[in-house]
Amino acid sequence: MSSGKQRAVEDFVEEEDQYAEDDAEEFITEDDIDAEVEDHGDEPMDDDDDGQGEENDDGEGSSGAIEDNSVQHFTTHKASVFSIAAHPTEPLAASGGEDDLGYVWDITDGEVIVKLSGHTDSVSCICFSNNGEMVSTGGMDGRVRIWRRVGKENYRTWEFLTELQGPDEVNVLKWHPKGNVLLAGGNDGTLWLWQLPSGNTMQVFAGHTGAVNWAEFTPDGKRIISADADGILMFWDPRSPTPVFKLDSTDARFDLDGITSLGVNPSSTLAVVGGAAGALRVINLTKGTIIGTLGGHTEGESIESVVFVDITGGATGPGVVVTGATDGKACIWDLSTMRLRATLQHDDAITHLLAHPAPKPYLVVSASADKTLKTWDARTGTLIKTHKAHRAPVLGAALGLNGSVVISAGDDGLCGVWTTEITDEDGVEHY
């Protein structure tokens, strides 16, 4: 990476946020633990797992020039990269892929910090804890593995902590927004909740009949929402194995032909749920009722991602949501009126959407099977920047360094890093 490109990344490094276990309402206590995960005697990483991976040139091939405006590449994966995460404060990314491996790496120079081994099938999920002290991987082998930072000086040394047994195939892995609590959903329809670093099982949720495609904590951390391939939506109190409410296709208004994505607004009062056939429903989480239908996507095209954006800065009320689908459209909706504000367009399926944090919460990033990512101004539908380097579909994306960089996961085995800020070289396009 040239010094100019390195500075382009480093200039956006924000002052590290202090992780505070503040006086917010306690999430779960030790009294709520149902069972304890056995210690399987896992050993720390071998010396040869020192993170010094080999370069992979497959993603950038020798035939044909590929337009590339990235500031950094990570090419150590030997096959498709399925999942990508950005550290909450440091210039680090974590990626997991079809090669059964995960890596933590430096986004400024592409250096491998630690190799995350131990899976026997694809690493389908990867994420950092809210305070950045731990990183978790979930695999198609049903394993959930945890690493933690060693020492307090920097984030360059990590050690293996524990392996957790949960679903038979991990589709979803999410950390609690305030504490060291980890949620996993799997192909067998179960949800698991653990407390770290102890590894204690806090709850196992059953009731889904299909693969859990989506699960997350509400932004306030008090509830869990999950959805499956059979079209069942469940809303949980983490302390109880019985759902607060359940919605499914027995209500004809909620027949989505399987749920593929969902998002919850910042006030944790509304959810927007997307289905495999292109339908969208707005759910009141307080009452467990359907309050709206959004119809801007092509029938039969799956909704792949749902994110809420703040287009005014500190806005209250239902909010504004962006939905992305396999029809290549990203639709921006005003939920106070249930009307479409704007439509953003890719040349192929949209695979992932990201909402930019403050101070520019009106920006949204889209990733697509058309091999690009794009940064948009959701207030106007203006295309701010197109991010290019991939020669195959972009499967995932994450925002790092307070949103100043976007990091990708590609079907070509490449992870790319771009700045999201406008530079003198960038043109601004309109749709």
Image: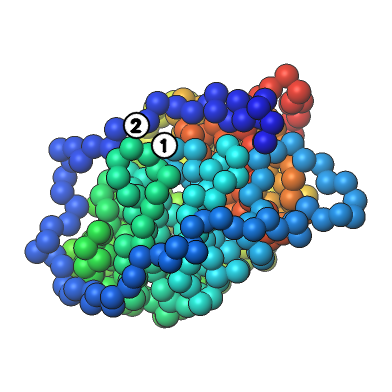
Distance of label 1 from label 2 (alpha carbons):
7 Å
Q: Check disc 1 and report the residue beneath it.
A: 89
Q: Is residue 299 left or right of residue 135?
A: right
Residue at image mark 2: 17
Residue 27 x %, y %: 19, 52
Is any part of residue 111 visible from this angle? yes
Tell me which corner region of the image, top left, top right, bottom left or bottom right, holds residue 377.
Answer: top right
Q: Residue at x 70, y 58 (%)?
A: 56
Check the image and tell me how it is coloured.
Answer: rainbow
x%, y% of residue 12? Answer: 53, 26
Side of 309 where 206 appears, left or right: left
Instruction: Name the residue: 13% across, 65% down.
Output: 32
Q: Residue at x 42, y 80 (%)?
A: 168
User: Which residue occupies the extreme front position in the image?
Assistant: 47
Q: Earlier in the sequence, mark 1 or mark 2?
A: 2
- Mark 2: secondary structure: loop
Which secondary structure lies at badge 1? loop
Vertical side of 403 occupied by 410: above or below: below
**Residue furthest left in the image:** 31
Say what amino acid the circle numbered 2 marks: Asp
388 in relation to 310, above or below: below
Amino acid found under the numbered disc labelled 1: Thr
